[in-house]
Image (cartoon, rainbow, N blue to C red):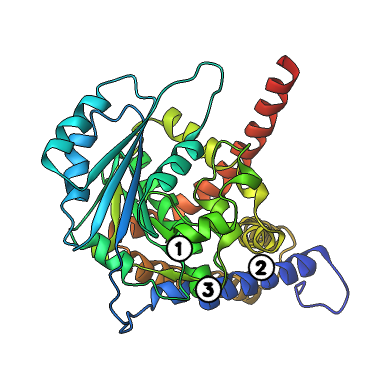
Amino acid sequence: MKSLFTPELSIPFILFCLFCLTILVLLWYYLYYFSRLAFYKETDSSINYPPTSIIICAKNEDHNLPEFLPLVLEQDYSDFEVVVVDDCSSDNTSDVLREFEKKYKHLRTITIKEDKKHHHGKKFAVMVGIKGAKFEHLLFTDGDCKPIDNQWLKKMMRNFSNETEIVLGYSKYKKLPGFLNKLIRFDTFHIALQYLSFAMAGNPYMGVGRNLAYKKSLFFKYKGFATHYHIESGDDDLFINQAATKNNTGVEISPESFTVSRVKKSWKGWIEQKRRHLTTWTEYKSSDKIRLGIYPFAQVFFWILFILLIILLQIEKMDQSELYIILSMFLLKTITQLIIFKMAMDKLKEKDLFVISLIAEVFLLGFYPLLTISNRLFRRKQWKKS
């Protein structure tokens, strides 16, 4: 019988070496990075509750604000304001906010009127909110997003110090029946697993605007969104990628600090959302792009090489013991991944996603490249039409 471990180079041997390399790379990500979130334990910190401005940009949110805004306004916190930027709403958002202002004295509304000559995106609304906020410490969320607990503000703010200028939180999506909902929530969990774990390892690269805090002085120090204002998305991740460092970034993952958002209920709506999100990663720092790029490439090659090796072992009629070696390595990587993912899901209260984790991972490994290609083709067509 032929052997995989021959001194001479052969296609099965080369593939096996590459398979080993991808497993080592993935184990590095699981054990060095993702284990930090999986095994994270809260440490005692000096309780610091600075005066805070919560900033919400609302565009046509009259159906969400009555349900979500009271949970923000009724936080258990001594000194805070809520600044809602009414961004050119054409529905009854302004009326809803006026009614809330009568009841809550710490609510302030800033209205942006539509200018047909000058179109603006969310970044302009965020800047208006920041300039209008009266406090140094800022906490951001969205109009279709709500804190899970009235301790949300306390949990996020307790991380600030003279050195800490950014706090990254976790924002989940509402749990609903169906595969699409689980897929969206797994994708959200997987992204959070990366940006939270990387920040814990001293490599912060992004945050999510549905649950993100930073100091106003930091925003002006980096001239706000000046370097990426031309990109529609990125009011959260691109600014954090620019301003976050090993020493100035903290992470908060206590369950009371989570926020939850309404989730897309159609494939079309979710795909459009992901298309917008994918426009920003090319603007990340080179080191972050490399660190983030190696991980999915290793995932893709792991599955491709595993399948090819199984097929070649059968075609070449290799020794059966070598099949067991490959299967053992597959199990080593997969079991390690599942343990880390399970513990991280427990931390982020996403336990029901464990069952579909491998299926969702494989689906997304095919989905993201297709979406990236689609984005490039779409932009090229738009450019030709203009």
Q: CA distance from mark 2 to mark 3?
A: 16 Å
Q: Name the amino acid type tagged 3.
A: Tyr
Q: Residue at x 51, y 16 (%)?
A: 116
Where's the N terminus, which quadrant? bottom right
Q: Count residues near mark 3 (Cα–Cα under 10 Å), then give few for <14, some for 14-19, many for 20+.
A: many
The numbered mark at residue 117 is: none
Is residue 269 among the parts visible in the rendering?
yes
Give the residue number, with chain letter if any, for mark 1: 193
Q: Quadrant of residue 59?
A: top left
Q: Determine whether, in the image, residue 264 is placed left or right of residue 30.
A: left
Q: Name the amino acid type tagged 1.
A: Leu
Give the residue number, with chain letter if any, for mark 3: 33
Residue contact between numbered discs 2 and 3, judged by CB atoms under 8 Å: no
| Residue reaching furthest to the right | 8
Q: Determine whether, in the image, residue 181 is placed left or right of residue 330.
A: left
| Closer-to-camera residue (115/93) | 115
Residue 2 percent coordinates (x, y): 77, 72
| Closer-to-camera residue (258/94) | 94
The numbered mark at residue 22 is: 2
